[in-house]
Image (tube, rainbow, N blue to C red):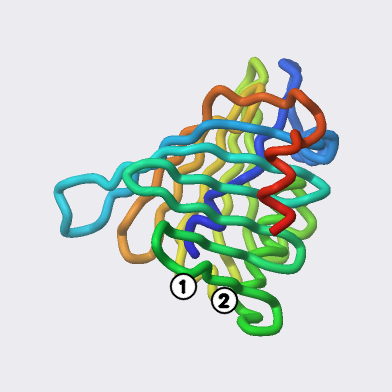
Amino acid sequence: MRFLLIIIALVSLSAQAVTLDQLQQRFSQQPVLRAEFSQQRSVSGMDQKLNSSGNLLISRSDGLWWQQQKPFPLSLLLTDSKMVQTMAGQAPQVVTAQNNPQMFQFNSLLTALFHADHRALEQNFTLNFSDLGQGNWRLVLEPKTSPLNRLFKTITLEGQNYLNNIDINDMQGDSTKIRFFNQSTEPKTLTDAEKQHFSS
């Protein structure tokens, strides 16, 4: 479920100097965000990089829906009560706090990332936030608690008007690069078709 941590809420930012507190406030003001993504994973010992792409939908009130379209269909639904991963031709895999408490703790972590809640993030990471000028910013997360510090070296978020890049370096020497584009915050409520993803 590693990609739970690489799906981060995207947020609109002003072009002025940015602080982590301002970032958190901006995150909390986005009811719905839609984006496309591309992901490239480099695995130690493999010359060929693993590429995937798809769409992302985040609703503050409903949850997150990650839909990979290439190289094969895969969807991840995350709400306050469950995580559901679905692949074509396979039964959905459902994770709840009851049947897998350790895995489900990533839900709380993702919520903290979604809101840029630095107080919650500081419980699990050492934070290094930088204002890069002209509205650009970078947030580097270094895990300091188990099991995160056994999985990841760093998680780096970068953006300007939106979160644009996520770079993950793990303890096995592998890396994952996520790029977000075509971000949109309109309409501000879910369409009927989008609501169906969260009603199942």
Which one is in front, 185 or 155? 185
Q: Where on the picture, by quarter, is residue 16?
A: top right
Between 132 and 43, the one nearer to me in the picture: 43
* Amino acid identity at mark 2: Ser
Crowdedness near tag 2: few (<14), some (14–19) or many (≥20) residues, C-alpha within 10 Å? few
| 199 or 163: nearer the viewer | 199
Residue located beneath label 1 in the image: 150
Q: Is residue 117 above or below residue 193?
A: below
SS type, badge 1: helix
Rendering coords of residue 144 (x, y %): 59, 68
Give residue 68's position: percent from left, percent from top.
45, 45
Q: Which residue is mark 2?
A: 146
On screen, residue 102 above or below 151: below
What's the residue at 65%, 29% (across, down)? 131
Residue 50 percent location from the top left of the image? 28, 47
Q: Nearer the viewer, residue 100 or 152?
A: 100
Query: Amino acid type of disc 1?
Result: Arg
Q: Counting other residues with Cα less than 10 Å from the Cα at mark 1, is it few (<14), some (14-19), or many (20 or more)?
A: few
Q: Are marks 2 and 1 in contact (CB under 8 Å)?
A: yes
Whole-percent x, y for residue 2 in the image: 48, 61
**Which residue occupies 47% across, 34% down?**
179
Horizontal side of 41 relative to 76 (left or right) equals left
Query: Does residue 30 appear left or right of residue 140 in this picture?
Result: right
Q: Distance of mark 2 from mark 1, alpha carbons? A: 6 Å
